[in-house]
Image (cartoon, rainbow, N blue to C red):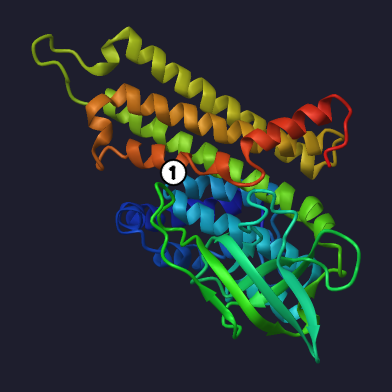
């Protein structure tokens, strides 16, 4: 499927995603119907090969699809990002049945990396995987896992069983005995993404559920997950910024706001100045996203630098643009119907997701001054 066709499919699913966005945010409910619309359009397999039921799209196609979805509902975009990231790992290292399940959307996947002990340093898990008779026993305290109660397959990280290295990856069915989620998600933003802690207590899985070699988790995280996750999270952030820009323009261009002077907000030079800043920032971030996609897809030598830059810059842009949107729309911005306050809340998350913006700036500084990242 071509990029144009994939994005046309995303646009066709957008009305359903947009229809439920406010309810998902208000009630903090998982966007089941929105994910269903994406599944129906084949978009849960956008980055998967056609021979297993996917659309045959590239990593750039995944990111641009997330960008379109995020303009409608950031919670749905977050769920999609985690699924597409997990599906890429499964596609590279999973079984044929697992590959087909995630590519066709029969199984929703997610990443189960974050832990209390290593916080945003997701590449360094503390959870254990040990041989237990003819199985692998998992014990863990996972801190944040999107779609925790709804994903069918977790792409799970642990310490290696016996090999050297920081981590090993596994595909773990959610219904595995010994797994349980804790609490409910009542976050500031992304309220429908069902991000919860997961506890594993003597959860047993077949050793054949390992993704890649024992001890090779770090390499898979850096080579497969990091580029995909950073690109899609950035695309989601920029989509939030784009949505806020649109809502702000609609508000200031609406009916006359000052009856005594017969003028609208857009008649004020200060308002136009702020909107112009929002437009420039959003367009700049989008341009960097397109360049990052080009760098990754064409194997440019600056690809890793762009991978690091795009998540940091996308997250910062969303924070800046949505803050300006709140300022421009004034008291009206606090109303749910304007939409800006939801964009503002949703924008807060990306900078705190590992690698955090502060960690990324450190990595970028190391990269451009010729230092090793780790």
Q: Residue furthest front?
A: 117
Work out which quarter of the rendered image holds the N terminus and state it.
Answer: bottom right
Determine the residue positioned at 77% across, 55% down: 221
SS assignment at label 1: helix
- In the rendered view, tell whether residue 350 sits above or below residue 370: below
How many marks can you see? 1
- Point out residue 208 in the picture as x, y percentages from the top left corner: 80, 82
Q: Furthest residue to the bottom?
A: 133
Q: Can residue 290 be seen in this view?
A: no
Query: How far from the left and from the top, in percent, is residue 293?
Result: 71, 40
In the figure, residue 371 lies in which quadrant? top right
Q: In this view, does 151 lie to the left or right of 125?
A: left
Q: Mark 1 points at which residue?
A: 346
Task: Write the residue at 30% across / 59% down.
Answer: 27
Residue name at image x 28 percent, y 10 percent: 268
Whether residue 333 appears in this view of the structure is yes
Q: Is residue 235 left or right of residue 127?
A: left
Check the image and report above or below for 222 versus 374: below
């Amino acid at each position: 499927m071509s990029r144009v066709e994939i994005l046309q499919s995303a646009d066709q699913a957008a009305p359903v995603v947009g229809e439920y966005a406010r309810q998902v945010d208000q009630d903090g409910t998982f966007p089941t119907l929105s994910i269903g619309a994406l599944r129906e359009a084949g978009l849960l397999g956008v980055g998967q090969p056609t021979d297993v039921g996917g659309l045959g799209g590239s990593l750039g196609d995944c990111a641009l699809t997330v960008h379109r979805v995020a303009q409608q509902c950031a919670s749905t975009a977050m769920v999609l990002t985690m699924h597409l990231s997990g599906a890429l790992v499964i596609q590279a290292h999973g079984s044929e049945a697992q590959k087909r399940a995630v590519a066709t959307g029969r199984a929703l996947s997610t990443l189960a990396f974050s832990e209390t002990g290593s916080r945003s340093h997701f590449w360094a898990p503390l959870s254990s995987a040990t041989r237990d008779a003819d199985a692998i026993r998992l014990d863990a305290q996972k801190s944040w896992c999107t779609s925790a109660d709804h994903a069918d397959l977790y792409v799970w990280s642990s310490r290696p069983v016996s090999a050297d290295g920081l981590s090993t990856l596994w595909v773990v069915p959610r219904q595995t005995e010994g797994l349980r989620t804790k609490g409910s998600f009542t976050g500031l933003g992304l309220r429908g993404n069902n991000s919860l802690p997961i506890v594993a207590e003597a959860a047993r899985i077949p050793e054949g559920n390992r993704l890649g070699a024992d001890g090779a988790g770090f390499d898979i995280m850096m080579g497969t997950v990091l580029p995909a996750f950073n690109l899609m999270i950035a695309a989601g952030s920029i989509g939030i910024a784009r949505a806020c820009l649109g809502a702000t323009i609609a508000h200031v261009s609406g009916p006359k706001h000052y009856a005594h002077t017969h003028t609208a907000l857009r008649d004020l030079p200060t308002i136009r100045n702020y909107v112009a800043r929002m437009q420039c920032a959003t367009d700049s971030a989008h341009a960097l996203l397109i360049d990052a996609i080009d760098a990754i897809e064409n194997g440019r030598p600056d690809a890793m630098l762009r991978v690091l830059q795009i998540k940091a810059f996308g997250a910062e842009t969303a924070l800046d643009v949505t803050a300006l949107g709140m300022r421009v729309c004034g008291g009206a911005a606090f109303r749910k119907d304007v939409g800006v306050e939801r964009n503002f809340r949703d924008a807060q998350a990306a900078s705190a997701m590992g690698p955090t913006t502060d960690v990324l700036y450190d990595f970028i500084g190391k990269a451009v001054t010729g230092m090793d990242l780790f």
